[in-house]
Image (cartoon, rainbow, N blue to C red):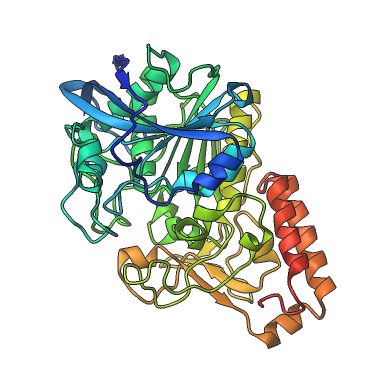
Amino acid sequence: MEKHHLMVSVPIVEGPITGPGTPFLINTSSDQALSAAGYEAKEYFISGTATSYRSVNDLPANGMWEVESAESAAYKTRILVYRPMDAAKFNGTVVVEWFNVSGGLEAGPDWTLMHNELLRRGYAWIGVSAQYGGVEGYAATSLDIIKLDLKTANAQRYGSLSHPGDEYSYDIYSQVASAIRNPGSVNPLAGCHVERILAVGESQSAMRLTTYINAIQPSVQLFDGFLVHGKLCTAASLGGDSLHGGDLSNKTPVFLRTDIDVPVLILESETDVMILGYYRARQDDTDKIRLWEMAGTAHADLYLVAKGSSDTGNDPSIANVVEVLSPYPGVIECGLPINDGPQHFIAKAAIHQLDSWVRTGVGPTVADRLEIAGDPPAFVLDALGNVKGGIRTPYVDVPIARLSGLGQPDASIVVSLFGTTRLFDDTTLATLYPDHDTYVTAVENATDAAVQAGFLMPEDGELIKAAAAALPDDPTH
C-alpha cells in the first residue's frame, strides 16, 4: 500500500500570556513545588491551520493504520509550559502532555503524578489544550465532574481561542511538537537545547495517543517516545466524535502497531485492565513496546485528587496509606474509601525509564502481568485480598491494607474509577507483623527490590522507608 506522507506546519506562538487572571488547570501541583525547584510557569497561545485525517485502509485492530490528509481549519489554542528558570539545569527532555478533558475541564494528571521526578531531574513539561472540549466545552455527560472549559473559566483571558473540533486535535498536537523542534521568534524554551520530546497522556488522552501512534507518528516522526497511561481497550476516532461518556469497556480492542520505531511504555492500573477492558487489548512486549501493569492501583486515586497538589517530594507522610471517602466533598462522594496506592511512585519511575530508554536504547524491566482467571475474567487475589502479579511494591507485598482498582459499590463510571482502600484491622496486622521492626525490615526489603527492578525511583524508595520507620507499632495509626 502506498504510504501517505503527512505534512506538519509550524504554528504561530504568542506570549507569554500575562492576563487577565492566571493559567487555568485543575489538579496541578502547587506553585511552591515549582518555586522550590527553580521552575517557572508560563502560558502561550498557538495558532495556525490544522489538518484532519481520513482512513486509507480499514483501520485494523493490529494498529497498522494508514491515513491521509483531509480537511483544514484555522485554530487558536494554548500551551502551558513549566521549565527550569536556569536553562543550564534543563536535562534535554521535553515531556508533552495531552490534557485530559474527560471531567468537563482540562486536567494534567500525568503532571500531577510525576511532577516531583520531572522537577528534580530538570525536565521541561508542556501541557497542550489539544481537544475541543477543553477550550469550547462539550455537552455535559456522565463523566463530567464539573463543566468548566477554558472560555467558561476565564472568558477574558481565553475568549480569543478557537478550536475547530477533535478531528484536528492530532495535527494540533503535532504542531506543538513542531514548534518545539523548530522555534520561531517566540520560543517558550529559549536557551534550552532540546534533545528529546516525549508524548504522555492518561485515560481519554491515552486513547488519543494510541490513535496518534498508529496513524500519525510513523509519518511525522515528531516524538521520540510515548507514555500511554491508563489506556482503555480501544482507540479514539479520527473524526470529531469523542469517547466522552458512555460505556467505554466494550469497544472493539485496538492494539499498538508493532512496527513503531520509537519506545512506547504502556502504564495500566487495575481499573484500566478490568473495568475499562484493557485486558482485551494486552499485547506482548517487543523491543519498542513495554507493558507495565501496577498492582494495588486505580485509574484515579487519592494522590491524584488530593495529595499530589501539595507534594514537594520531601514529605514521607505522603507514602502513608489512609482512608478517605470523599475526595471532593459534594462533588465526588464514594461508598468506600478511595484507592491510596503506589501509582504516583510507579509513574515517576515510568517517565524516568522511558527517558532512559530513548537516551540509551536499553528498555526498562519486563514486568509480570496482573493475574487474571475465570470466565468472566477476574483478578486472582492473595489471602489478604490484594491482586497477584503485576508490578510489585511494598504497598502489596508488605501491605497494611487491601488496595484495589475495583470495589466501589456505586455503579457510576466516575466513582468506579477511584478504586478502594480497606485498612486491615489490628488482629490482622498483629498476625502479619509481630513487632514494628519486623514491619520496617519487610518494607525496606520490598522497597529495595522494587528500586532495583526500576519500578521505584531511589528518592521515592527512601520516602517509603522513612514513612514506615516513622509509624508507631500499629502501622495504620
Q: Is residue 143 visible to the viewer in this orientation of the structure? A: yes
Q: How many marks?
A: 0
Q: Looking at the image, which is closer to me, 257 or 212?
A: 212
Q: Looking at the image, which is closer to me, 338 or 467?
A: 467
Q: Residue 27 location, x and y as percent?
A: 42, 52
Above or below residue 138? Residue 320 is below
Above or below residue 149? Residue 143 is below
Q: Residue 271 location, x and y as percent?
A: 44, 60
**Res 407 quadrant in image:** bottom left
Q: Residue 224 location, x and y as percent?
A: 50, 24
Point 51% across, 30% down: residue? 83
Seen in the image, is 359 located left or right of residue 259?
Answer: right
Above or below residue 465? Residue 195 is above
Q: Residue 193 location, x and y as percent?
A: 55, 16
**Res 375 quadrant in image:** bottom left
Seen in the image, is 430 located left or right of residue 220?
Answer: right
Point 68% across, 83% down: residue? 428
Q: Is residue 65 visible to the viewer in this orientation of the structure? A: no
- In the displayed orientation, state which residue is furthest to the bottom: 427
Q: Quadrant of the C terminus?
A: bottom right
Q: Quadrant of the N terminus?
A: top left
Above or below residue 151? Residue 395 is below
Q: Looking at the image, which is closer to me, 391 or 38?
A: 38
Seen in the image, is 152 located left or right of residue 32?
Answer: left
**Res 413 quadrant in image:** bottom left
